C-alpha cells in the first residue's frame, strides 16, 4: 500500500467511512452507502460560509459606526446594540489566561471541532436523503459560528460583541451572529443524533454475514 492510499484511508476513516469499494467476498456490512460519493461537505460549507460572511459584515458595520462601550436600543426594552470587545473565549472562559495560552486553546478547540464535524458529515451520508439535510444544516451552523469568531481572531485577538437582549430588568451580555448560530445549533443536534441512532438500528437489523464454510458444509447467514 502506498503512502497516498494509506493517507486517503486515514482521511476516509476520519469521515466515518469504512468501505469505499464493493467487495464480493466481504460481508454486506452495515454501511453500503459508503460507496456513494461523499458530497455532504458542500452544502454544509456553503451554509457555514454564508453565516461567517454575514457575521463579518455586521461586525464591520458595528466597529465602523459605534465606539466601544456605546449602547443603543434597537427595539425599545427588548433588543440593543452594545459594542463590546471580548478578549476571552466563549462565555468568557479563560479570560485571565495569558494571550499565548488562549491562542493555543483556540487552535486546539478549532482542530477538535473540525474533526467532529468531519465525522458528522461522513456519517450523515449513510442516512436517508431527507434526513441528511438536518446534519448538513447542523454542521453548517456550527462551522459558520466557528469561522465567524475565529476569523476575527486571526486579525486581532478578541471578538466584537454587540447584540444584547433584555431579560427581565437586565440586559444580557452581548453576542454576535456567530454566537447566535452556535446557540441555535444546539437543539439541531437532537434530530441529528436521533436519525443516527435510527440508522444504526436499521443497519443492525438488515445486515447479515456471508455463509461460512465448515468442513465441506455451508452454514446459514450469520447476523452482524
Image (cartoon, rainbow, N blue to C red):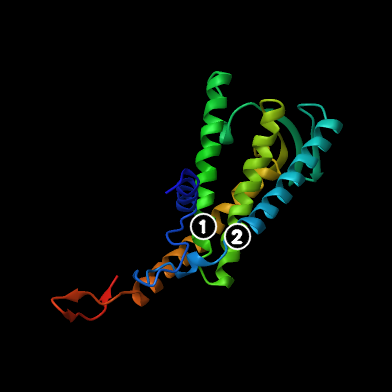
Q: Are marks 1 and 2 in contact (CB under 8 Å)?
A: yes
Residue 159 visible (yes or no): no
Does 161 sit left or right of 66 as displayed? left
- What residue sits 64% from the left and 26% below the top? 87
Q: Position of residue 10 (x, y in %)?
A: 45, 48
- What residue sits 42% from the left and 65% below the top? 197
Residue at mark 2: 40
Residue 157, by quadrant, is: top right
Q: Along the line of sight, which residue is nearer the eye, 75 or 7?
A: 7
Residue 164, by quadrant, is: top right
Query: Residue 49 got which mark?
Result: none
Q: Position of residue 214 (x, y in %)?
A: 16, 75
Element at label 1: helix
Neighbor class of circle 2 (other Cα within 10 Å; few <14, some 14-19, many 20+) is: many
Hey, which residue is sitting farthest top in the picture? 98
Q: Along the line of sight, which residue is nearer the eye, 184 or 133?
A: 133
Residue at mark 1: 122
Does 214 sit left or right of 133 as displayed? left
Q: Position of residue 42 (x, y in %)?
A: 65, 57
Alpha carbons under labels 1 and 2: distance apart: 8 Å
Neighbor class of circle 1 (other Cα within 10 Å; few <14, some 14-19, many 20+) is: many
Question: In the picture shown, does residue 21 fall above or below 165?
Answer: below
Question: The C terminus appears in which quarter of the rendering?
Answer: bottom left
Amino acid at each position: 500500500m502506498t503512502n497516498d492510499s494509506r493517507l486517503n484511508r486515514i482521511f476516509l476513516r476520519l469521515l466515518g467511512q469504512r468501505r469505499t469499494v464493493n467487495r464480493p467476498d466481504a460481508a454486506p456490512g452495515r454501511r453500503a452507502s459508503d460507496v456513494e460519493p461523499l458530497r455532504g461537505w458542500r452544502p454544509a460549507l456553503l451554509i457555514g460560509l454564508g453565516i461567517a460572511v454575514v457575521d463579518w459584515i455586521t461586525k464591520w458595520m458595528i466597529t465602523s459606526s459605534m465606539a466601544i462601550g456605546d449602547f443603543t436600543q434597537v427595539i425599545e426594552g427588548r433588543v440593543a446594540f452594545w459594542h463590546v470587545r471580548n478578549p476571552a473565549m466563549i462565555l468568557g472562559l479563560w479570560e485571565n489566561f495569558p494571550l499565548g495560552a488562549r491562542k493555543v486553546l483556540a487552535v486546539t478547540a478549532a482542530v477538535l471541532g473540525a474533526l467532529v464535524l468531519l465525522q458528522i458529515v461522513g456519517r450523515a451520508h449513510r442516512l436517508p436523503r431527507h434526513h441528511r439535510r438536518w446534519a448538513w444544516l447542523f454542521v453548517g451552523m456550527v462551522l459558520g459560528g466557528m469561522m465567524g469568531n475565529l476569523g476575527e481572531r486571526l486579525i486581532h485577538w478578541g471578538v466584537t460583541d454587540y447584540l444584547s437582549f433584555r431579560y427581565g430588568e437586565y440586559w444580557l451580555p452581548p453576542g454576535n451572529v456567530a454566537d447566535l448560530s452556535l446557540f441555535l445549533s444546539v437543539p439541531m443536534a437532537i434530530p441529528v443524533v436521533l436519525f443516527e441512532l435510527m440508522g444504526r438500528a436499521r443497519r443492525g437489523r438488515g445486515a447479515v454475514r456471508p455463509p461460512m464454510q465448515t468442513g465441506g458444509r455451508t452454514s446459514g447467514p450469520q447476523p452482524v
